[in-house]
Image: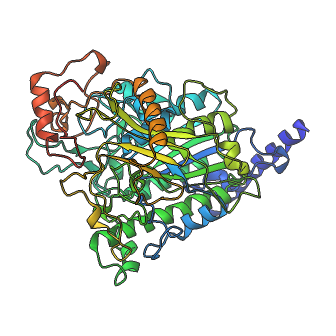
């Protein structure tokens, strides 16, 4: 049997070479095959060779996509996402699925399988901040490589780049095309505003931030970022059609994060239908991303790779309603621990899913930290790691069985010995156990979305804190968090508070957020590059100048009750 397959492969290869030779002789020209299809469209694996022993894994992470920004959730159908809808409706829709409230912690939990209190990256990493995802943690691409996968990151990293050993290629990715910061200009591929004065003490740093592996990639300048990222993903798929190794592709899109930019042709379909300018551009960016999903899946099917692939789509947090997103009917937005900030769009599609679950909703509890054990244990055949917070969800998703996850921790910190009733409040946190969700600490104004106001501007925090410092909701019966039962359900409250304290005591030190003036790209030819070599943030103590510089950048009474956003060097 093996010799027959080998002989057939040889015949196919010789046929392709003969075809090329005939084309060259007849035309007198050298044939150049398109990057996306290459020779792969002529060479198919023999059906008798069977599927791969380990499926390919594609994880697509949208940035700041709101719950109500996809058509299959959209009550008013003002944004059209037919391709995302098709993939979701043919697969398994994750309707009780959570991420973190902002991007860096979500990405770190995805990569490590840990709650954000246990990987240290609890806040958004800004340009020039010296910390990165701790190198003592083995992360997803490193683990999957040990199980025979090739690994690829396309798009946003946002897990630190102050040292070379923080970069994607040093953390397990074979290839990388994208940017290191949290956002970029979709055409110029810059972060921040390069027109700012070239002063090391400017309010925020600005410079070029686009890379191919560890080299600056200026050749892509002027091309729209979403198009670049999807095309590179197609090329990766095409290049693997003849490989025996499975691949892990992390397509980490910048869309639909600000700045609000998209080619005009994607906006035109919304002219006269959406009046709010931010919502209109946001809709165009979402439609462009949706088109990319069609192009990607068309490539998978055309090259006969789809049958061996598991595709997951997710958002990294709730939508930024103040930038055109919508989380209707959920309360809140990006940066909040109400449902609108952490309950996110997600689905799985694959021919490997059981027929009975294709086209269904999965309502079992799940979080973004679960993908590492799901991919490693469930799909790649690795062993269980008891140190992880994530759990293997593959069998539950694949066959529709009950979720092995019974609780999920969103955040915790402060004084772990705080007792209920003590003043002042010195502990904070949010946890879900079963149907119950406890939030300890201010939640901002509690104003619920109005279906007539897609932008939900009224939810945006206006600088005053709610009198409801603590909330307790039964999410199953009160998914929109309208009925605070904190003062009524004493036993439930005590149970969740006890578990919150348990997690508080397991918390690791937060990665330093002090920003260094030396990181300014204007000191390095206008490019964001690693600026500390072999530097251990755990052994570094910020200087007075570092602290003052960070205060200038952050002390703006940010959008969180009880948090000034200021830092004193003891973070």
Q: Is residue 466 visible?
A: yes
Q: Is residue 99 visible?
A: no
Q: How is the image coloured?
A: rainbow
Along the viewing direction, whichever of 22 and 9 lies nearer the viewer: 9
**How many badges with numbers are in the image?**
0
Q: x, y (%) of residue 384? A: 64, 27
- Quarter holding the N terminus? top right
- From the viewer's perspective, tell me whether residue 385 is left or right of residue 137: right
Instruction: Name the residue rendered at 21%, 23% in the picture.
Output: 570
Along the viewing direction, whichever of 450 and 241 lies nearer the viewer: 450
- From the viewer's perspective, tell me whether residue 8 is left or right of residue 474: right
Residue projecting furthest to the bottom: 272
Q: x, y (%) of residue 454? A: 35, 72
In this view, 235 is above or below 512: below
Q: Which quadrant would residue 426 be assigned to in this image?
A: top left
Instruction: Name the residue rendered at 38%, 78% in the picture.
Output: 270
Q: x, y (%) of residue 327? A: 40, 62
Instruction: Name the residue rendered at 27%, 53% in the picture.
Output: 444
Q: x, y (%) of residue 271? A: 35, 81
Along the viewing direction, whichever of 380 and 121 lies nearer the viewer: 121
In this view, 185 is above or below 549: below
- From the viewer's perspective, tell me whether residue 542 is left or right of residue 56: left
């Amino acid at each position: 049997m093996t010799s027959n397959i080998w002989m057939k492969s040889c015949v196919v290869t010789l046929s392709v070479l003969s075809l090329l030779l005939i084309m060259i002789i007849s035309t007198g020209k050298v044939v150049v095959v398109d990057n996306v299809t290459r020779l792969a469209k002529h060479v198919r694996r023999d059906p008798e060779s069977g599927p791969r022993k380990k499926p390919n894994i594609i994880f697509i992470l949208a940035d700041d996509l709101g719950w109500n920004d996809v058509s299959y959730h959209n009550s008013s159908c003002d944004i059209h996402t037919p391709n995302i809808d098709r993939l979701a409706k043919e697969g398994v829709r994750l309707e009780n699925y959570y991420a973190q409230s902002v991007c860096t912690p979500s990405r770190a939990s995805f990569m490590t399988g840990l709650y954000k209190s246990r990987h240290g990256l609890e806040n958004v990493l800004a340009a020039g901040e010296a910390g990165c995802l701790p190198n003592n943690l083995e992360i997803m691409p490193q683990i999957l490589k040990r199980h025979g996968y090739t690994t690829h990151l396309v798009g946003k990293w946002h897990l630190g780049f102050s040292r070379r050993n923080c970069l994607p290629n040093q953390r397990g990715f074979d290839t990388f095309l994208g940017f290191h910061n949290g956002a970029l200009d979709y055409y110029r591929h810059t972060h921040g505003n390069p027109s700012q004065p070239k002063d090391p003490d400017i309010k925020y740093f600005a410079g070029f931030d686009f890379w191919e592996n560890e080299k600056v990639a200026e050749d892509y300048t002027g091309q729209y970022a979403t198009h670049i990222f999807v095309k590179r993903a197609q090329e990766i798929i095409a290049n693997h059609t003849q490989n025996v190794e499975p691949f892990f592709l992390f397509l980490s899109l910048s869309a639909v994060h600000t700045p609000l930019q998209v080619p005009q042709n994607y906006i035109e379909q919304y002219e006269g239908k959406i009046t709010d300018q931010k919502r209109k551009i946001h809709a165009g960016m979402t439609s462009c991303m949706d088109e990319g999903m069609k192009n990607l899946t068309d490539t998978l099917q055309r090259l006969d790779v789809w049958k061996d692939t598991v595709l997951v789509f997710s958002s990294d947090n709730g939508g930024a309603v103040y930038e055109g997103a919508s989380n209707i009917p959920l309360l809140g937005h990006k940066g909040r621990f109400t449902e609108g900030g952490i309950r996110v769009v997600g689905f799985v599609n694959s021919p490997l899913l059981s027929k009975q679950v294709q086209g269904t909703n999965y309502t079992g509890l799940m979080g973004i930290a679960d993908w590492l054990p799901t991919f490693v244990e469930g799909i790649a055949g690795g062993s269980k790691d008891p140190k992880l917070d994530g759990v293997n969800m593959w069998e539950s998703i694949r066959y529709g069985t009950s979720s092995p996850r019974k609780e999920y921790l969103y955040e915790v910190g402060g004084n772990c010995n705080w007792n209920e009733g003590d003043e002042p409040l010195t502990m904070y946190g949010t946890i879900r156990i079963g149907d119950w969700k406890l939030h300890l600490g201010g939640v901002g104004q509690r104003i619920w979305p109005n279906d007539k106001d897609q932008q939900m501007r009224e939810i945006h925090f206006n600088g005053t804190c709610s009198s409801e410092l603590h909330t307790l909701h039964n999410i199953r019966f009160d998914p929109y968090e309208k009925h605070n039962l904190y003062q009524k359900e004493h036993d439930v409250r005590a149970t969740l508070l006890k578990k919150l304290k348990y997690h508080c005591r397991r918390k690791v030190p937060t990665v330093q957020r002090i920003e260094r003036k030396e990181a300014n790209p204007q000191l390095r030819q206008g490019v964001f590059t690693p600026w500390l070599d072999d530097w251990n943030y755990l052994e570094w103590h910020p200087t007075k100048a570092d602290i003052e510089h960070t205060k200038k950048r952050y002390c703006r009474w940010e959008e969180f009750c009880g948090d000034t956003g200021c830092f004193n060097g003891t973070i």
